[in-house]
Image (cartoon, helix red, strand yellow):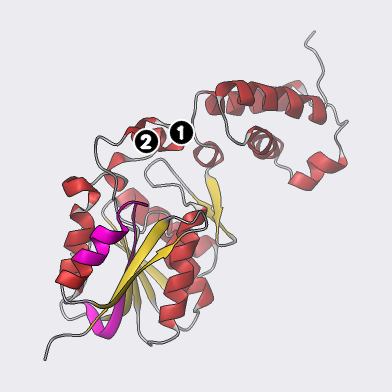
Amino acid sequence: MSAEYSVEQMLNKAAQQLIESGSDSPSLDAAVLLCHALDKSRSFLLTWPEKVLSDEQRERFQSLLERRLKGEPVAYIIGEREFWSLPLKVSPSTLIPRPDTERLVELALEKAALHEGDILDLGTGTGAIALALASELPHRQVWGVDLQPEAQQLAQSNAESLKIANAQFLCGSWFEPLAAGTKFALIVSNPPYIEKDDPHLGQGDVRFEPLTALVADEKGLADIKHIATQARDYLAEQGWLMFEHGFEQGAAVRQLLVSLGYQEVATYKDYGDNDRVTLGQYSPQM
């Protein structure tokens, strides 16, 4: 006969295992996984800590926990991550949306308020940035582009699940799927910007994320350079381009944008006080 465990006992045991495995949020990980296994909300765990789990529930939770103990990200295990208060489906074909990227959304909303027109999100992944902007700007059209068909389909599925009708997603390499002459008031991107030999690629959740969405040549700047160069043909008069980038890349991205003719170039910090977003405004030379 198998031992009986209450909700509280199961959470405590799992949290201890997660501490030993190196998780930086063991109690949260355990709670999220148990909620998923039970198909219950966090309030259920708090309200019924003495509730005894059935053998089936315990086995389901243990299966999820084993994956987390091997390092697999919680978001991939449960297939969801919240971003900008939007529940987004995620998969191993996309990056996991992170809180620091919400800084890019905040700055994009500031610039969007100054300039009417469509918005473009390049390398959209789950659609997190595009859907956050579309949810805040329901009368604006937002477009997302991703190279991977699985990502494009996932982003479109997220838009449909969230009933966000003003966001559409295309498949292709950066600007490739856009019609010639298309203009945008704002172009945003969280492109690959990590060097291929960066030691962080072998640590934490990043180990499980797609390298194509993480790594870029030229010290991590190749895709940023390509986008910034091509974006000049797709920005409306006085349109804005902005990137999320690595915390040590602010100066290099500013220099790049200035060299390409962008004005009002500036870098903004994330919530951890690291350089994270650089932007610039572009007008065709007369």
- Left or right, 21 with respect to 268, comes to right
Image coordinates for residue 93, horizontal then vertical, percent: 37, 43
Name the quadrant of the C terminus: bottom left
Q: Which of the 4 quarters of the picture holds residue 125?
A: bottom left
Count of marks overlaid on the render: 2
Q: Nearer the viewer, residue 66 or 15?
A: 15
Q: Nearer the viewer, residue 41 or 129?
A: 129
Name the kind of residue labelled 2 in the image.
Answer: His
- Left or right, 266 with respect to 220, comes to right
The residue located at (21%, 65%) in the rendering is 255
Please say whether residue 45 is visible from this viewpoint. yes
The residue located at (75%, 45%) in the rendering is 42
- Left or right, 14 with respect to 168, comes to right
The answer to whether the residues at label 1 and label 2 have Cβ atoms under 8 Å apart is yes
Please say whether residue 166 is visible from this viewpoint. no
Residue named by callout 1: 204
Check the image and report above or below for 38 versus 266: above
Q: Which residues are magenta?
A: 233-255
**Mark on residue 200?**
2
Q: Which of the 4 quarters of the picture holds residue 196?
A: top left
Residue 246 part of the magenta-drawn span: yes
The residue located at (60%, 61%) in the rendering is 85
Check the image and report above or below for 241 versus 75: below
